[in-house]
Image: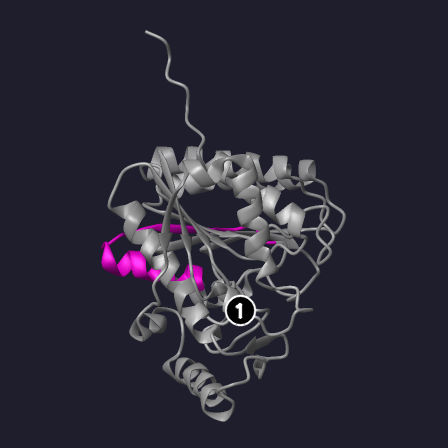
Amino acid sequence: MTIRIFRGKASIKHDVDRTHPESPDRLFAIDDQLLASGLEMVCEHADATPIAKAYLTLAHSPTYIDEVFTQAAKIDEAAPSNEQDVVWLAEDTGLVKGSLTAALESAGAACLAVDWVMQGHDRQGFCATRPPGHHATYDSAMGFCIFNNIAIAARYALQTYALKRVAIVDFDVHHGNGTEHIVAGDQRIMMCSSFQHPFYPHSGSPVLASNILSVPIDAGATGEVFRNKVAHWFAALTHFKPELILLSAGFDAHAEDPMAHLRLTEDDYYWLSVELKKVADTCCEGRIVSALEGGYDMSALGRSVVAHLKGLAYQVAKPAL
């Protein structure tokens, strides 16, 4: 078992407003907890590289992709000395200098992680990059997301490694509407999704297609409720037999997070990660790629990522001879 953490150098340059909840501080908080826990020294590390523009069409329309590039170029041309000029792609999703590179690195990290786990045995990759991706639809930015990193990675894995089945598990507190929008009906992909409902972005129930397994959860639900509601995922995933498991790893369902109203703790993220690792060990030689989505209380986010990675490091004890 080896966990490799992928980071994008431009991730901290994507900073539309210091009051915006999706800020570079999120990555600093994760790094602090990785150091404090000792995981920083145990895990491997790699730099992300920007994804080639052509690969973005695996999940997005060429028209939308060109619009993002055009808007990013306008920032450079209009105010080369002003790092804070913002072009808003959506009400809550903006571009500043460095944002396009950060978004390309975020999608690139997910695909690099796919390459890495597919080229070895019992490997897990974690993409500590931003912006997140699961709200980005086929043709629009949304919810802090520019490109849909996990949907791109899923299609990239299917295309590059001739896989027949890939699973996506999204446990962010907000429904991954963009991912569902992109993969609905693609029977090569099984998507399991848990989210507070009704809640932003007010989607996810009913599901769009038979390859989607959604778990809406009422506000105020505890970790025990969460565990009971998602427990059927593991048998369904094992039956599906994915050749790769991809995670949209959002940690904003934590009880301390200000953006939502579920009551999960680090123990719940550890439990979920262990159970998913067991499925991966059974179905796909332990291969998991996890990409950061939400999580907006800095301390809770860092602690939850540590718990998540410890869960992905889970090993079944071998019987004594």
Can residue 235 be seen? no
Please tell me how crowded label 1 is: few (under 14), some (14-19), or many (20+) other residues with Cα within 10 Å: many
Residue 183 figure quarter: bottom left
Can residue 58 be seen? yes
**Range of residues picked out in magenta:** 149-172
Between 229 and 8, the one nearer to me in the picture: 8
Residue 257 placement (x, y as % from top left)? 70, 52
Q: How is the image coloured?
A: one colour
Residue 273 placement (x, y as % from top left)? 51, 38
Rendered residue at 44%/55% (across/down): 211
In-image side of 312 versus 215 (left or right): left
Rendered residue at 39%/55% (across/down): 189
Q: Is residue 106 magenta?
A: no
Q: Where the C terminus falls, by quadrant?
A: top left
- SS state under label 1: loop
Furthest residue in direction front, as rendered: 81
Between 14 and 150, the one nearer to me in the picture: 14
Rendered residue at 27%/47% (across/down): 118
- At label 1, the amino acid type is Cys
Q: Where the N terminus falls, by quadrant?
A: top left
Q: Disc 1 marks which residue?
A: 145
Furthest residue in direction top, as rendered: 321
Q: Is residue 102 above or below residue 94?
A: above
Residue 167 placement (x, y as % from top left)? 41, 50
Q: Is residue 143 above or below residue 194?
A: below
Residue 16 placement (x, y as % from top left)? 59, 74
Q: Is residue 159 magenta?
A: yes
Residue 67 figure quarter: bottom left
Between 314 and 192, the one nearer to me in the picture: 314
Furthest residue in direction bottom, as rendered: 78
Rendered residue at 45%/68% (across/down): 102
